[in-house]
Image (cartoon, rainbow, N blue to C red):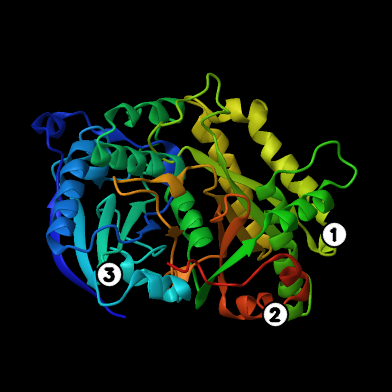
């Protein structure tokens, strides 16, 4: 199966007034976040294989994208000095590719690394700051099936704001304008004002945390509802409330990875779990659900060398304490003019930890409950949503959670260095709960 790009265009906002809007200011969270593309791929079964009708679909996608960029105009601009986004007439790259194979054949036994060929950009690779904020690629299979992929720059967007863009684009495409959501393009920089110039040592620290040279492997595992329920009970321990599904899975995978690290090195070392936390509902006052930008940060749980054999419920308690920090006065201290000082102290603490020790870091983020399986451009919901095939040569250990096809289980897209992944795929405890079955659909 081959994928060949047959056209490339730059899609710009349809309204000329957008080009004269004030620059979009970054929050200090966006300033801290490296420039790298976060991917998503939506697979749609063939409704009509007529080439003329497929051409009309693509034309409609281009027009509706141009219209949605009038609202989500920062995605059409370019970054300036890691401080603001301007030049909204630069536009968004839009590729069309032909796939000489049937979608049904691909979904029967998808090769995960092949997913990168459907993407307009290499995912999770260190990029220059001047790259486009988003790019799209429409892949047309020989049967008429379509895969629409996006690559969203993490410098501008997190999962909630990126999905808001895609949902609104789809709503315009299918003609339900009442479901288009207008983003708030100013709120994040008001709550978390940017710092200019930004301290270089903090940027270097974040790049070190995000990008480490290794041969990274991504695999997709599925946890069914029964497995998740069992892990939540184990993670609860004696506490009154069960951890969430994502918290239980994060700590279980962390536990397995710590055991693997010990087996590789032969001696215990500190291990850090970082979990992405959406801050929009935790600020005072609360922010809009569609505040544009990176409005998240990392809950950080540390297991030192004396805690390597902790039970799952003990690790869950560490994560619970880390997340609870964002429901406290600490969250208030991140807001407003003094917020950067609080973040600077966080960076200094991490820098001190890395100066004295070399901990493992395992990052987790959840894209569940963002409605990615309901992105309808006018020809129904996707039969499957993929994420990525292979990260770049410098990345980090990352797990992305997404809703499983049945709506009850969870897919865990785990990226680890090659040695760790080889051991994880053979870990009996891990495989007690995680399924490696790759078949998606029998279209």
Residue at the disc numbered 3: 143
Name the mark nearer the viewer: 1 or 3: 3
422 on left or right of 295: right
Residue at the disc numbered 2: 426
Quarter of the image that includes the N terminus = bottom left
Q: Earlier in the sequence, mark 2 or mark 1?
A: 1
Q: Earlier in the sequence, mark 2 or mark 3?
A: 3
Residue 125: quarter of image: bottom left
- What whole-number distance in Å separates the C-alpha atoms at marks 2 and 3? 37 Å
Seen as rendered, the residue at the extreme right is 238
Residue name at image x 19 percent, y 63 percent: 96
Residue 150: quarter of image: bottom left
Residue name at image x 82 percent, y 49 percent: 233
**Residue 6, image x and y in percent?**
15, 69
Name the mark nearer the viewer: 2 or 1: 2
Q: Judge by depth and name the residue closer to the eye, 92 or 429.
A: 429
Q: Judge by depth and name the residue closer to the eye, 279 or 1.
A: 1
Q: Judge by depth and name the residue closer to the eye, 160 or 155.
A: 160
**Residue 353, image x and y in percent?**
66, 56
**Residue 337, image x and y in percent?**
47, 25
73 on left or right of 149: left
Residue at the disc numbered 1: 310
**Residue 78, image x and y in percent?**
23, 46
């Amino acid at each position: 199966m081959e994928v060949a790009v047959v056209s490339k265009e730059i899609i710009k906002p349809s309204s000329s007034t957008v080009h004269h809007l004030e620059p979009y200011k970054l929050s200090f969270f966006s300033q801290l976040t490296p420039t790298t593309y976060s991917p998503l791929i939506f697979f749609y079964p063939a409704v009509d294989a007529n080439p003329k009708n497929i051409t009309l679909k693509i034309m409609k996608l281009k027009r509706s994208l141009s219209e949605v960029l009038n609202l989500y105009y920062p995605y059409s601009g370019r970054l300036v000095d890691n401080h603001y986004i301007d030049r909204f007439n630069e536009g968004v790259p839009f590729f069309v590719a032909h796939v000489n194979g049937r979608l049904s054949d691909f979904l029967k036994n998808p090769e995960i690394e092949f997913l990168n060929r459907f993407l307009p950009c290499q995912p999770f690779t260190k990029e220059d700051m001047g790259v486009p904020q988003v790019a799209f690629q429409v892949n047309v299979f020989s049967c008429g099936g379509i895969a629409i992929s996006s690559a969203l720059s993490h410098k501008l967007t997190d999962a909630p704001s990126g999905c808001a863009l895609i949902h609104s684009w789809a709503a315009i495409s299918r003609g339900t304008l009442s479901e288009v959501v207008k983003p708030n393009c100013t709120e994040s920089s008001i709550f978390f004002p940017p710092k200019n110039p930004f301290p270089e040592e903090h940027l270097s620290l974040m790049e070190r945390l995000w990008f480490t040279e290794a041969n990274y492997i991504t695999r997709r595992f599925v946890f069914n509802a029964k497995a998740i329920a069992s892990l939540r009970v184990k993670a609860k321990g004696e506490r009154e409330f069960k951890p969430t599904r994502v918290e239980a899975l994060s700590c279980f995978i962390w536990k397995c990875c710590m055991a693997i690290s010990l087996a590789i090195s032969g001696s215990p070392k500190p291990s850090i779990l970082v979990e992405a936390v959406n801050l929009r509902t935790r600020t005072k006052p609360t922010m809009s659900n569609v505040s544009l930008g990176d409005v998240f940060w990392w809950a950080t749980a540390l297991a030192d060398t004396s805690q390597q054999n902790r039970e799952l419920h003990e690790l869950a308690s560490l994560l619970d304490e880390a997340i609870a920090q964002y429901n406290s006065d600490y969250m208030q201290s991140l807001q407003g003019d003094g917020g950067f000082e609080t973040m600077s102290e966080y960076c200094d603490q991490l820098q001190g930890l890395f100066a004295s020790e070399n901990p493992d870091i395992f990052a987790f983020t959840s894209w569940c409950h963002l409605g990615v399986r309901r992105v309808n451009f006018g020809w129904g919901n996707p039969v499957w949503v993929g994420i990525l095939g292979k990260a770049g040569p410098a990345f980090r250990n990352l797990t992305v959670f997404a809703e499983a096809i049945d709506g009850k289980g969870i897919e865990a897209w785990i990226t680890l260095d090659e040695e760790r992944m080889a051991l994880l795929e053979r870990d009996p405890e891990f495989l007690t709960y995680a399924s490696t079955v790759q078949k998606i659909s029998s279209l």
